[in-house]
Amino acid sequence: MSVSSGFALICSSRAEVAESLIRELEPLAARCEVASGRSEWPAEVPGVAFIDLADASQPVREVRLAYGRRTELVAIVDNESVERLIPALAAGCGDYLFYPINPDELGLQWRKHLAGEGGTGARRPGGLAGHLQFEFPSRVQFVREVVAEVVEACERLAFSGSRATLNLRVAVGEALSNAILYGNQEDPEKLVRVVAALSAGSARVTVTDQGQGFDPQAILDPTRPENRERSQGRGLFLLRSLTDEVSFNERGNSITLTLRE
């Protein structure tokens, strides 16, 4: 059976999660179906399956086995289930979204899905061995290509087959998405620049956008009870959880991620 790219399967028994996703996906012309348990997974192959990591009845590996690699798996993670994100990515999830759902982030995720895996030709202005550089317009179709190249080089030059490699993939993808969505406001005339320095046991990746920047010290702590329903700060919290060091330039439009094996 062929995959239905516009069909989104929502794997969650939490009504509030399913309703939130449906509400935000319908304006994007997505056809949605909810499965509160594995017995309700449809025979039709979805283009995307959103898997609620807070719901133990939705095992990632079984969703992957049910639909194969034709279906893109996206983890839905909240503050209570964030520790399950890396195992979910290792089990087959290709990406993730935070709950409560941010409509802009979901829209970016859906456009990445529709853009597919094709090469997009992100420009690489030189670079020495162990030193990669990319420049590309603020379009979501570049994210997967650049992340894949950075991770492939990391596996050859820095650390191979380790949890650090998976952390790097998630962290770089998050930084690129933030640069496109929040830094450059998805303005295709503005560029995103990536510089990766890789050596044995260490990776340092800098992502710079052409936006106005921000003050990272002003970002709310999403782990505090009063902030748990807010969307602000969750991406930065995740980056700090996945990497050994996160730093910004003075303007706040350039982030450097450092990982060590």
Image (cartoon, rainbow, N blue to C red):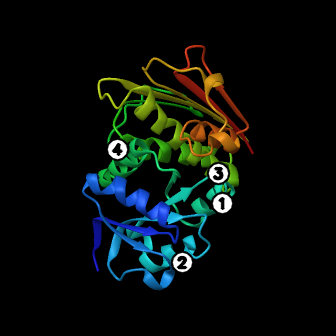
> How far apart are labels 4 and 1 at the CA level?
27 Å
Res. 181 visible in picture: yes
Location of the C terminus (image quadrant):
top right
User: Which label's residue is closer to the chain start, 4 or 2?
Assistant: 2
The residue at which mark 4 appears reads as 141
Q: Is residue 60 placed above or below 212 in the rendered structure?
A: below
Q: Nearer the viewer, mark 2 or mark 3?
A: 3
User: Which label's residue is closer to the chain start, 2 or 3?
Assistant: 2
How far from the left and from the top, in percent, is residue 172? Answer: 55, 40
Which residue is more in the foreground, 58 or 91? 58
Tell me, for residue 62, which label it has, or none. Answer: 2
How far from the left and from the top, in percent, is residue 28? Answer: 27, 52
> How far apart are labels 1 and 2 at the CA level?
16 Å
Q: Amino acid at mark 4?
A: Gln
Q: Amino acid at mark 2?
A: Glu
**What residue is drawn where x is 65% and y is 62%?**
87
**What residue is drawn where x is 40% and y is 72%?**
34
Disc 3 element:
loop
Tell me, for residue 79, which label it has, or none. Answer: 3
Which residue is more in the foreground, 130 or 104? 104
Badge 3: how crowded within 10 Å, few (<14), some, or many (20+)?
some
Q: Is residue 212 placed above or below 103 in the rendered structure?
A: above
Q: Cβ–Cβ below 8 Å for labels 1 and 2?
A: no
The residue at which mark 1 appears reads as 84
